[in-house]
Amino acid sequence: MKLRLTILFTAVLAVIVLMVNYTKSSHEEIFTVDNTRVFNEFRMTIDTKRNGEKMLKDYDSNIGMLTMQYNAAKEERIKQQIFEQLSQQKDDYQRFSMTYTNEATVKIWQRINEYIKEYAKIKNARMILGSSGNGAVFYSEGQQDITQDVLNFINQKYEGSN
């Protein structure tokens, strides 16, 4: 009798373990996120854009000041020196504008990808697809859009890492 109960208990326990494992593996899903929205609403993007705009305003301010000095200068030698500084500032402005945007975009996507990979592991996701409507994924039947959940997660991670 005790042997039968032990065998029955073991069998029931085995069935429960199998059901839990099946349920766990069947919850692995494919999710979609609006990658354009994730990028634009990621706080690192917002912070980086704000910092870049501040730096560009500083360049604009310097260029404006040099322009006023140039216009006010009477001596040709001084005008030439200011003109050279002004040309250099404009070149620096252009170079900064291009490199800052490109380098910042790369860093932001690296951080987003790192956080989404961590998110996927926590949520037991098999795949997270970007769906911005630009050719990546136009339609995904039965897939869950987790854009807001991902945004919450990555912004919390970013806020915690600063």
Image (tube, rainbow, N blue to C red):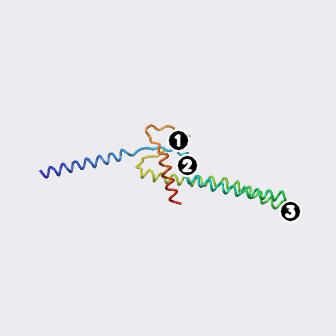
User: To which residue does mark 1 refer?
Assistant: 136
Give left or right: position of 115 versus 101.
Answer: left
Identify the secondary structure beneath mark 1. loop
Task: Please name which of the two marks, 1 or 2, marks the residue nearer to the observer.
Answer: 2
Q: Amino acid at mark 3?
A: Arg
Give left or right: position of 83 versus 54.
Answer: right
Give left or right: position of 160 versus 83.
Answer: left
User: To which residue does mark 3 refer?
Assistant: 77
* Nearest the eye: 56 or 134: 56
Q: Is the residue marked by circle 1 packed among few (<14), some (14-19), or many (20+) residues within 10 Å?
A: few
* Nearest the eye: 65 or 100: 65
**Above or below: residue 136 compared with residue 2:** above
- The residue sitting at 45% across, 52% down in the picture is 119
User: To which residue does mark 2 refer?
Assistant: 41
Residue 91: x and y in percent read 73, 56
Q: Amino acid at mark 2?
A: Glu
